[in-house]
Amino acid sequence: MLRLLGPRPDFAQTLTVEVREVMGRHAAHCRPYIDSGQMVVFGPVLDDSGSYGLGVVETDDEEALRAFAAADPVVTTGTAQLLVGTMLAGIVRPR
């Protein structure tokens, strides 16, 4: 699981033009996982505490996912943090 933490709670709602460009590069960076079907869900989440980004990736290679996260434009530009977690179990509806 990838969790994008912005520098402030209203990050998703208050993007500057420059940050929107970085977020576009972030989405393009994630595109291979999305196109391959490994990225099960991807996008911003709003809750009572603010916002964060969520990506759920089906992979057995956590090291590769961590390297992928470290190379993400949001990380390399210092725009946001991208945390990697492990979902121990999950149920996905049939297609």
Image (cartoon, grey):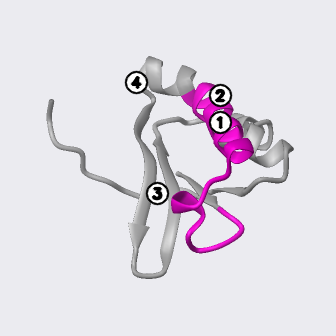
Residue corresponding to mark 1: 26
Is 75 situated above or below 64? below
Q: Which mark is residue 82?
A: none
Indicate whether residue 22 is drawn in magenta: yes
Question: Nearer the N terminus, badge 2 or badge 3?
Answer: 2
Instruction: Name which residue lies at 58% across and 61% down.
Output: 14
- Amino acid type of disc 2? His
- Amino acid type of disc 3? Met
Question: Nearer the N terminus, badge 4 or badge 2?
Answer: 2
Q: CA distance from mark 2 to mark 1?
A: 5 Å
Is 42 situated above or below 51? above
Q: CA distance from mark 1 to mark 4?
A: 17 Å
- Dot 1: element: helix
| Mark nearer the viewer, 1 or 4 | 1
Where, by quadrant of the figure, is residue 29 drawn?
top right
Residue corresponding to mark 2: 29
* 40 or 75, nearer to the observer: 75
Is 34 situated above or below 60? above
- Amino acid type of disc 4? Gly
Is 11 situated above or below 2? below
Main SS class of the magenta portion in the image: helix
Q: Which residues are magenta?
A: 6-30
Q: CA distance from mark 2 to mark 3?
A: 22 Å
